[in-house]
Image (cartoon, helix red, strand yellow):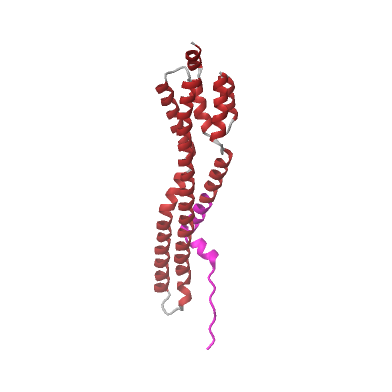
Amino acid sequence: MEHSGYAVDYMQVLRSSWVIVLMLFLSILVIGVSIERWFYFLRTKLDSDIFIDKIKNYIIDGNYEEAINFCKKSKGTIPIVVRAGLENRQLPRDEIDKIMETVRMEQRVNLERYLGVLGTLGNTAPFIGLLGTVLGIIKAFRDLASSAGAGPEVVMVGIAEALIATAFGLSVAIPAVILFNYFMKKVKNISVEMDAVSKRLIILMANYGEGAHGRKRG
């Protein structure tokens, strides 16, 4: 007995399932956000130890304006925090600390920008895929009921839609979760660096700053 094979028309499946179209869009969104964040962190990469050593030399020499200009020319979030401290160096130490803390909070918002998209998709994409699976199974049963006596080919589109939706849901969610955790780790590391550099700057200005020079000379 000769059997004729049945090939699934994936374009037909794509046209018939809005969930799969949505998952395609979400996968492109994950890729776009990941590329944008990758280049952002690459552009803002900075060796904080080398940077703060340079700032220390400026403070010891009393060249605060040069230190501020150096911060303006340097890339990353740490120079922005240090610049805020230097520009408010005449204030009491606790006030400087509060100002830099505020700037650190603002910079963390910049670091975490768009990462909520990855976190949300990592949590919701499997459920969107599951919705597509349920809709595909419903479609398969509906086609089967409306074509009594027909062969299994009539349900192939619905079953294919269900399976493809499941695969798309997982293929979007898994990379999104991995990338979200990776970028959040970088955010945490940079935040720790900002905190450490802020404390080092306050100590440097207390020991080598303008007021400190006056006390030592007197």
Q: Position of residue 79 (x, y in %)?
A: 53, 30
Kindly give the residue lying farthest to the top in the view shown.
Answer: 218
Task: Give coordinates of residue 150: x percent, y percent.
Answer: 45, 78
Corner quadrant of residue 91 = top left
The tally of labels here is 0
The answer to whether residue 76 is left or right of residue 152 is right
Q: Is residue 19 magenta?
A: yes
Is 50 placed above or below 117 here? Answer: above
Residue 79's place in the image compared with 184, above or below, is above
**The magenta stretch spans which residues?**
1-29
Q: Is residue 25 left or right of residue 123?
A: right
- Please report the residue visible at 48 percent of the width from the left and 21 percent of the height from the top: 207
Residue at point 52% right, 25% down? 83
Which residue is rendered at x = 54% and y = 34% of the image?
A: 49
Q: Is residue 195 magenta?
A: no
| Chief SS of the magenta region | helix
Considering depth in this image, is 1 or 75 the residue closer to the camera?
75
The image shows residue 165 at horizontal and vertical percentages of: 46, 62
Query: Extreme bottom residue here?
Result: 1
Query: Observer-nearest residue: 57 or 181?
Result: 57
Residue 104 percent coordinates (x, y): 45, 32
Residue at 54% across / 73% down in the picture? 7
Which quadrant holds residue 50?
A: top right
